[in-house]
Image (spheres, grey):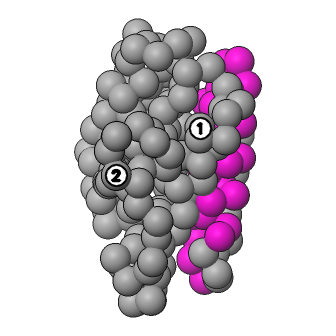
Amino acid sequence: MNKILVLFDSKTGSVEQMAALVAEGAREVPGTEVRIRSVAEAVPDDVVWCDGIAVGSPTNMGVLSWKMKRFWDETMGEHWMKIDGKIGCAFSSAGGWGGGMELACQSVLTVLMNFGFLVFGVTDYAASKLTAHYGAVIAKAPREEESQAACRLLGRRLAEWTAFYCHGRREEHPAAKTIPRMPPS
């Protein structure tokens, strides 16, 4: 069974909405079990349990939230070097475009890399002019279908990578599938 954890912090509810969409995308891959946990309720066993993790944070001055950072520093600190090789990705929301969401995703990915996670971005276009190279990024809440599609794509890709790398399911490799790709406009 493919096991995906969607871990999030959400101040206004926007990242929580994104987390639900990321989980929805992960569930598109057959044989995938998904846990959604807020950073306030997550425990180390959730991270140990998963094959792959999608970490969502509001953008706070261009980086991850202090609550998410504290989770990794204090809650997961003693598990450092015990969770190597899991697969991770990031998503973030800010109050507006240009608010630093991609930087926040990069700061999440940096934390994950320090714990030994293999991290990735998505080259596919979720919609015209909308990619998830550093993770799914949204201004405010994911109201538009394009924003929702970016979140689902990130979750699906995480589940595909974990199915392929952790469970040897070659048919789930993204390059083995026919995925509509939108060219840059």
Residue type, numbered disc 2: Pro
* 184 relative position to 15: left or right: left
Specify the quadrant of the image occupied by residue 103: top left
Q: Could you tell me which quadrant the C terminus lies in?
A: top left
Q: Position of residue 107 (x, y in %)?
A: 33, 30
In the image shown, does 154 or 146 lie closer to the viewer?
146
Query: In the rendering, which numbered label is found on residue 164?
Result: none
Q: Position of residue 174 (x, y in %)?
A: 40, 74
Magenta-colored stretch includes residue 13: yes
Any part of residue 51 in sight: no
State whether residue 97 is above or below residue 30: above
Q: Secondary structure at mark 2?
A: loop
* 120 relative position to 157: left or right: left
In the image shown, does 159 or 67 lie closer to the viewer?
159
Specify the quadrant of the image occupied by residue 39: top right
Task: Please give the residue where the numbered disc 1 appears in the rendered image.
Answer: 147
Q: Position of residue 159 (x, y in %)?
A: 52, 68
Task: Please give the residue where the numbered disc 2 appears in the rendered image.
Answer: 183
- Over which residues does the magenta segment extend? 1-28
Specify the quadrant of the image occupied by residue 119: bottom left
- The earlier-in-sequence mark between 1 and 2 is 1
Q: Could you tell me which quadrant the N terminus lies in?
A: bottom right
Compute the Cα span from label 1 to label 2.
17 Å
Seen at 32% across and 44% down, the residue is 184
Residue type, numbered disc 1: Ser
